[in-house]
Image: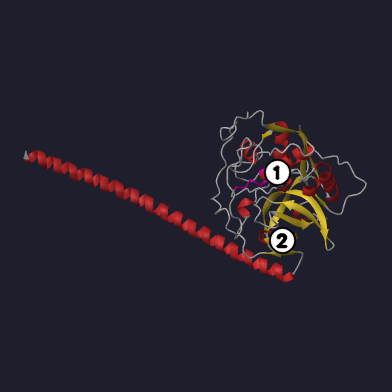
C-alpha cells in the first residue's frame, strides 16, 4: 500500500515538474513576443505623433504665406489611404474628344445634372488603400446616370471592383485605375453603394470613420484586407449577381487641360490621379497648389468641373475621405499647369445601357 502511494506521489511530482517546465517554456516564448509587439506599437505611435507634429508645422507655414488655400493644423496622417498607381500613358486607348465651339469659364456637373444624385455624393474609403476603386466606381455611377438622361440612379460597387479585379490590385493595397476601367469593359462590375446600403448588390465593406478632428462616425479601424471575391449579392438580396452587372461599351484616357474639360462637358466626370505631398494632407479650403513637403504617394480622385476665382483657374474635385474633410468632401486644385500631375492622364468610359 505504502509502495503504491509512494509510486503515485513520484508520478505526480514528475507530472507537475513536466507541466511546470512546459509552462515556463511557453512563458519564455510568449513574453518576448508580447514585449516586441508592445515596442512596435510604441514605435508606430511615436512615428504617428512625429508626423502629426510635422503636418502641423507645415500648416503654420502655409497659412503664413496667405496663398490661394488654407491649411488646418488638426489633421491626421492620410498616407495609409494613398493607393493609386501611376499608369503608363498607353495603358488605355486615347479618347477622341468632340470639341465644342467654346468652353465655359465655369462648369459644375452637379448643376448640369441635378437629378444625378451620385455626382453630389462623397464616399468614404475608410482605412483601406482603395481610392483607385472608389473613385472609379463613383465616376462610373455618374456616367450611367448621365447616359440615361438622369433616369438610372444605380451605384457601381467599389467593393466588387476591389475584391474581384485581381489584375487591378491586391485587396487594400495600391491599385491601377486603368486596370479598373478595363475590367469594367471586359468583366463588368455589379451595383453597390456604401457600407450597410441594402438597396444594391454589393455595398462597401467598411463604415465611414473620422478622418479629421471632428468626432462624428468614430475612429477609423486598423487597416485590414478586403473580403475575397464572391459572385453573389450581400444581405440576402434577391437580385441576381449576373443581372446586377454593369459594363462599359468602351474605355479610354484623355490628357491635357482643354481635352479634359471637353470630356467632362461631353460625357461627365472623370477619374484622375495626383501625387500627394505633405501639405495636401493639411488642406482645409481654397485652391490647392503644392508649397511644402515631400511626396507621399499617388491618390485617385474624381474631377466634376472647373472654375476661376480671383483670376486663379481650378479643377473641382471629389475626394473619398467623407464630407467632413476639405470643402464638404470636395477640394479645388490649380488648373492649367498639371498641378501634382492631375492633367497628365484621366480615365473615362461610356456605359452600356
Q: Position of residue 271 (x, y in %)?
A: 74, 45
Q: Is residue 8 above or below residue 294?
A: above
Task: Give the mark nearer the N terminus: 1 vs 2.
Answer: 1
Q: Residues within 10 Å of mark 2 (few under 14, many from 20)?
A: some
Please identify the quarter of the rendering in which residue 339 is found: bottom right
Q: Is residue 213 above or below residue 259?
A: below
Nearer the observer, 57 or 305: 305
Label 1 vs label 2: CA separation? 22 Å
Q: Position of residue 118 (x, y in %)?
A: 71, 44
Residue 138's tag is 1
User: Start and end of the magenta stretch?
Assistant: 128-133
Residue 335 in the magenta stretch? The answer is no
Residue ID for mark 2: 285
Horizontal relation, residue 71 to residue 106: left or right: left
Q: Quadrant of the N terminus?
A: top left
* Residue at 58% from the left image edge and 45% from the top image edge: 206
Residue 129 in the magenta stretch? The answer is yes
Q: Position of residue 199 (x, y in %)?
A: 63, 37
* Residue at 26% from the left image edge and 45% from the top image edge: 19
In the structure shown, which secondary structural element does the residue marked by tag 1 occupy?
helix
Horizontal relation, residue 274 to residue 56: left or right: right
In this figure, which colouring scheme has been used for the structure?
A: secondary structure
* Residue at 83% from the left image edge and 63% from the top image edge: 310
Q: Position of residue 114 (x, y in %)?
A: 77, 46
Amino acid at each position: 500500500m505504502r509502495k503504491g502511494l509512494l509510486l503515485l506521489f513520484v508520478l505526480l511530482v514528475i507530472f507537475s515538474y513536466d507541466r511546470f517546465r512546459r509552462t515556463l517554456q511557453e512563458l519564455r516564448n510568449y513574453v518576448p513576443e508580447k514585449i516586441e509587439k508592445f515596442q512596435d506599437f510604441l514605435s508606430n505611435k511615436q512615428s504617428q505623433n512625429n508626423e502629426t507634429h510635422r503636418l502641423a508645422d507645415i500648416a503654420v507655414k502655409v497659412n503664413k504665406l496667405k496663398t490661394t488655400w488654407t491649411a488646418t493644423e488638426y489633421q491626421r496622417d492620410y498616407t495609409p489611404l494613398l493607393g493609386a498607381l501611376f499608369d503608363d500613358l498607353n495603358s488605355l486607348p486615347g479618347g477622341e474628344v468632340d470639341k465644342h465651339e467654346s468652353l465655359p469659364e465655369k462648369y459644375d456637373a452637379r448643376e448640369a445634372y441635378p437629378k444625378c444624385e451620385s455626382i453630389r455624393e462623397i464616399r468614404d474609403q475608410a482605412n483601406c488603400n482603395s481610392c483607385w476603386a472608389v473613385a472609379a466606381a463613383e465616376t462610373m455611377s455618374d456616367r450611367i446616370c448621365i447616359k440615361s438622361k438622369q433616369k438610372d440612379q444605380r451605384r457601381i460597387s467599389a467593393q466588387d471592383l476591389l475584391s474581384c479585379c485581381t489584375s487591378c490590385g491586391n485587396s487594400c493595397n495600391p491599385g491601377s485605375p486603368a486596370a479598373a476601367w478595363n475590367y469594367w469593359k471586359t468583366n463588368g462590375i455589379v451595383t453597390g453603394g456604401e457600407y450597410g446600403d441594402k438597396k444594391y448588390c454589393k455595398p462597401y465593406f467598411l463604415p465611414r470613420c473620422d478622418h479629421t478632428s471632428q468626432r462624428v462616425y468614430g475612429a477609423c479601424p486598423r487597416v485590414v484586407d478586403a473580403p475575397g471575391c464572391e459572385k453573389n449579392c450581400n444581405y440576402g438580396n434577391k437580385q441576381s449577381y449576373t443581372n446586377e452587372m454593369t459594363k462599359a461599351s468602351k474605355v479610354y484616357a484623355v490628357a491635357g487641360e482643354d481635352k479634359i474639360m471637353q470630356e467632362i462637358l461631353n460625357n461627365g466626370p472623370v477619374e484622375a490621379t495626383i501625387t500627394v505631398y505633405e501639405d495636401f494632407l493639411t488642406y482645409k479650403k481654397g485652391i490647392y497648389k503644392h508649397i511644402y513637403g515631400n511626396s507621399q504617394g499617388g491618390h485617385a480622385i474624381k474631377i466634376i468641373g472647373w472654375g476661376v476665382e480671383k483670376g486663379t483657374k481650378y479643377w473641382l474635385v471629389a475626394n473619398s475621405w467623407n464630407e467632413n474633410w476639405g470643402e464638404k468632401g470636395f477640394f479645388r486644385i490649380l488648373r492649367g499647369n498639371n498641378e501634382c500631375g492631375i492633367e497628365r492622364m484621366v480615365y473615362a468610359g461610356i456605359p452600356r445601357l
